[in-house]
Amino acid sequence: MVTAIFRRRAAAFAPLLLLAACSGEREPTQAEKAAAAKVPGAPPSAIDDVRAANATASNVKESNDLLEFAYSYPREAAQIPKLADWLDTDRATKRDALAAESRRDQAMAEKEGFPYRPHSHLQSWQRVTDTRRFLSLSSEIETYMGGAHGMQGFGTLIWDRNRAAVLKPLDMFSSAEAFDAAVRDGFCAGIKRAKAARGIEPPEKADTTFAACPPASAQTVWLGSSDGRYIDRLTVAIAPYEIGPYAEGSYKINVPVNSALVRVVKPEYARDFLPIR
C-alpha cells in the first residue's frame, strides 16, 4: 500500500517537468525531480539531470604507511555524469596502480633491509574554461616513488558536449606534426623568454642532454577561452627534465592562437576557435 501511494505521488511530479518548460510555471524542486526520476519507466536522462543538479566537487584522499593518494575534480566536471564516471574510473585506475607498485616496493625494502618511504600520487583537476561546447580541464600531478625526490607532471582533457566524449586537445587538430609546425615559433620564443626570466642563459655549446625546444605536441597542452565562447588561448606545460635539469623546475608557456594554428584545426571544430587579431 505504501509503495503504491509513493509511486502515485512520484508520478504526479513527472508532469511538472514538462509544465515548467512549456508554460513558464515554477521550476520543480530537486525533491520533485528526484521523485519523477524514480517513476518506473522514467528516461535515463531524468536520472542524469537529478545527479547533475545535486553534484558537488569530488575530493578523495587516502594516507597510510603504504601510500598517500589524492584525486579531485571541480563541480563543473561532477555535473556531467559521463565525465564524472570517466574521472572516477581514472582515479580508481591510478589508485590501484599506485597501491600495486607501493606493495611491491615495500616488500622489496623489507627483503633488502632498508626503510620504505610511502609512495604518493596527488592529482588535482581544475577548470581551464567552460564554453557552450567544451569543458577544458587541466591537472597538476605530484608523485613520489621512493627516489631522491618526487616528480611533477601534468594532465589535460576536454569534454565535448556535442559528442558527449572526452577528447585530448591534439584530437582537435589535423595532426601532431601540423600542430607543431603552427606553434613552433611562438612556443620556442616563449621558452627563451621564460628561461631568461629565471636568469638562465642558453648554453654556449650545443647541449644534447636537454632539448632547446621540444615538439609542443609531446608536452601537455591546455586550451582555454578569454570570453567563454571561443577557444583563443593555448598553454603548453613542460615537466622537469624536458628542457632543463630537475632544479630548473617546470614551465608553463603561453602560445598565441594565431591564424596558422586555426588553419590546422579539424573542420568539425573550426567554428569553436578564434584567432587573435
Image: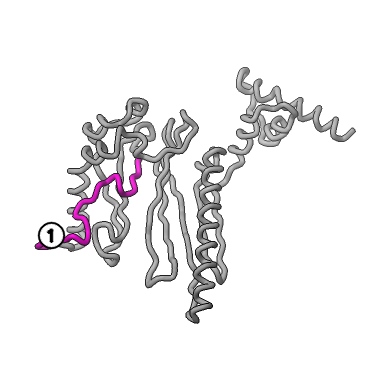
* Residue found farthest to the right: 1
Using the image as rendered, state which of residue 253 and residue 97 is in the foreground: 97
Q: Amino acid at mark 1?
A: Ala
Asked if residue 257 shows in the view, the reply is: no
What residue lies at 12% left-to-right and 59% top-to-bottom? 206
- Quadrant including the C terminus: top left
* Residue found farthest to the bottom: 113
Image coords of residue 273 (percent x, y):
32, 31
What residue did someone put label 1 on? 206
- Quadrant including the N terminus: top right
Q: How is the image coloured?
A: one colour
Q: Quadrant of residue 145?
A: bottom left
Name the dominant secondary structure of the magenta segment.
Answer: loop
Assess disc 1: are there few (<14), some (14-19) or many (≥20) residues with their C-alpha within 10 Å of its C-alpha. Answer: few
Q: Is residue 193 magenta?
A: no
What residue lies at 48% left-to-right and 64% top-to-bottom? 120
What residue lies at 27% left-to-right and 57% top-to-bottom? 242
Q: In the rendered view, would you say 45 is above or below 73?
A: above
Q: Is residue 204 magenta?
A: yes
* Residue found farthest to the top: 23
Q: What is the magenta range?
A: 203-224
Image coords of residue 114 (percent x, y):
48, 80
Image coords of residue 188 (percent x, y):
19, 48
Using the image as rendered, state which of residue 155 and residue 234 is in the foreground: 155
Using the image as rendered, state which of residue 19 and residue 184 is in the foreground: 184
